[in-house]
Image (tube, rainbow, N blue to C red):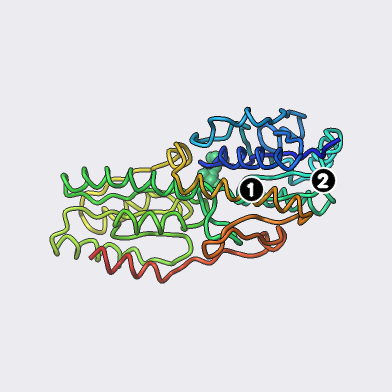
Amino acid sequence: MSEKVGVITSGGDAPGMNAAIRAVTRYGIMLGYQMVGIRRGFKGLLDDEFMTLTLRSVSGIINSGGTMLHTGRCPETKTASGMNRAIKTIKELGLSGLVVIGGDGSLAAGNALSKRGIKVINIAASIDNDIYGTDETIGYDTALNTAVEAIDKIRDTATSHDRIFVVEVMGREHGFLTLDVGLAAGCEFIVVPEMKYDIKKLADELIRGKERGKTSEIIAFAEGVGSSLEFAEKITKMTGLEVRVSNLGYIQRGGRPTARTRILASKFGFEAIRLFKQKKYNRLVGITDGKVSSIPIHRAMRCEKKFNEKELKVLRNLSI
Ligand code: F6P
């Protein structure tokens, strides 16, 4: 009997998860594993919801957003009883291990399972790009392009009306996505949780921008900072200028994955199975300096990804 490996997508969906499922499934089957898809994230492990993955069941998904396995947030994985139920299902299904595709919550669940003796490989997938141990997560590039395309459109209307815009960008408590969105869309400012800002100074700079002839000014505002509406109200009061707010919201999570996201997802999925075959378990697959890499899950959990403050200087100097 060949060994069975489970595949699960969990937490917030990210474009490219399907491409990763395809890669894990196809290479897993190539190497002689039976591949089992767990449905609806870790909830599927608790509720015994699974499907057999075949070469053909993952056909035609490399280019689609979302996840064919569905996903979900599952607070029960944080409890001992939830973990016991998950392990019971893993044993009943006869799984020799699990490939977990997701962000930081998935990493925590993968870590908890590995501590209880389950063989786990985590694959970094999240639009937030906030995971230590990888320069980029699956889905990030797609979300970045989606947000930039949206801001390009906002720029048109902002310029036509001589308005200031505060654009809210996702990223949970981090500003990685906001920083790159700001750079790529030529935003005048970014506001992120990692860095203190002086609202009075920012308001003065906005006025000075107008005085230099700027017809529009856009502030990319990370959701983790707080209320973009309250922030915009303060800016209106301080500048006397016309300010509008646009929350990009969940469009950042959907859509066809970019080529870059698909390539990353395919390489990560391939690497996850390669590690499995080599019996190198309990690792997070990512990319470092352009090369596919992996580090122990517990290390990825413990460490914080560093925010590159220097890039803010680039943004400010170029948006003058
Ligand atoms: O982690 C991805 C993400 O989209 C974050 O950017 C955001 O804060 C969060 O998920 C939203 O979570 P939910 O899907 O539970 O509303």
- Amino acid tagged 2: Ala
Name the N-terminal-most of marks 1 and 2: 2
- In this view of the protein, which residue sits in the foreground, 45 or 100? 100
Ligand 1 within 8 angstroms of badge 1 C-beta = no
Residue 270: mark in rendering: 1
For disc 2, the marked residue is 80
Q: Is residue 312 left or right of residue 68?
A: left
Q: Is residue 126 left or right of residue 203?
A: right
Judge the density around disc 2: few (<14), some (14-19), many (≥20) Cα neighbours within 10 Å. Answer: few
**Secondary structure of the residue carrying numbered label 1:** helix
Image x and y of residue 231, in percent: 36, 53
Image x and y of residue 259, in percent: 45, 45
How many numbered discs, if any?
2
- In this view of the protein, which residue sits in the foreground, 55 or 238? 55
Which quadrant, please, contains the N terminus?
Answer: top right
**Above/below status of 77 relative to 217:** above
